[in-house]
Amino acid sequence: MKADSSLMRAVAVNIDNKTKDFGIDSFVDVELEIPQLKPTDIRVSVKAAAINPIDLKMYRGAKNPGTVLGWDVAGVVEAVGSETSLFQLGDEVFYAGVVTRPGGFSELHAVDEKIVGRKPKKLSFAEAAALPLASITCWEALFERMHIPQSGSNATLLVLGGGGGVGSMAIQLGSRVAGLKVIASASREGTREQCLAMGAAAVVDHNLPLSPQIKALDLKTVDYILCLTDPGPIFTDLADFISPQGKICCLVESSVDLPMNLLRTKSVEFSWEGAFTKALFRTKDMITQHEILNTVSELLDAGVLKTTLSEELEAINANSVSAACRKLSQGGVVGKIVINGFS
């Protein structure tokens, strides 16, 4: 901590020099006021934080000095609000936070306890920080949006974009928790190998027409589709090989209006998933994100799931955040990039 006990170190977007290629001046090291706690907040000493596509999006839209990114955090509880009940000082936690509050590229971070889980005991802080946002996203998409049973079945799941952090977790949850036959998509050898390592039964190339590849696997249709890419260019394909009464869930905003009438004859159910929805709107079921992360933590400690950490950077500072964003923006990242806490 700094000599002034009311300040903490953080990394902020340099709004005077934002560059598309995330050059060395894209972020700045700053000192900010230590965040004050709302009644249901805890304050966390940040030990590691990961980079996600949402960081790139928020970077491009940042307009205010002191904008701090980072929505995948692992750390230790160092203060609790007046109405908290889930955590105590010294507890190790992991969580994603919410985009309407500052992110976790800071020494101390305030977050509502209802969206925080207990860090897996067998994982390092860096290994844990790779997981919260993807875990919440995939759990909600599979088990809340598409209502996939958490038991063995002969159903099939197609994960479009399986090599990244979210795809890697979706494959694991689909195959190892729900017992589905998971087909993943990837376009490079590295991401293809990642999909297979996570539990995919087969991998298709999303840069090629999908329908012929699905049918080449002796599958007439698939029961569930989790689309982690722009659904616009491939929606006709999705409508072609989704099963009657199947379910499709998408994460990424479509570049065009989707022709939903293509799903009508098959009575297909379509949904959107947004991991920040519950916290943004403070929904009545917001506490389920605490429960999801605790369940995922138990599955990780039991060896059912494994971390998706692929690269670990030394310490949170302007240079490391720039480097991580640059790598992610260039594409081809397998798993998750995580930055350890402040040195």
Image: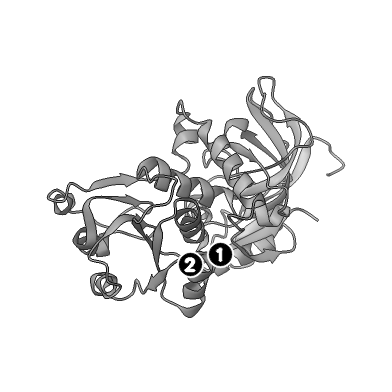
Residue 277 in the image: above or below residue 318? above
Residue 144 image point, x, y percent: 40, 40
Q: Residue furthest bottom?
A: 189
Quadrant where the image shows the C terminus = bottom right
* In front of the other: 5 or 38: 38
- Is 34 positioned to the left or the right of 325 in the image? right
Residue 338 image point, x, y percent: 65, 59
Residues at marks 1 and 2, CA–CA distance in whole angstroms: 6 Å
- Residue at coordinates 63% horizontally, 51% vertically from top-left? 300
Identity, as a three-letter code, of the amino acid under mark 2: Gly
Return the mark for residue 335: 1
Instruction: Assess disc 2: are there few (<14), some (14-19) or many (≥20) residues with their C-alpha within 10 Å of its C-alpha.
Output: many
**Badge 2 is on which residue?**
163
- Residue at coordinates 27% horizontally, 67% vertically from top-left? 219
Instruction: Assess disc 1: are there few (<14), some (14-19) or many (≥20) residues with their C-alpha within 10 Å of its C-alpha.
Output: many
Residue 275 image point, x, y percent: 47, 44
* In front of the other: 300 or 164: 300
Dots 1, 2 in contact, CB < 8 A = yes
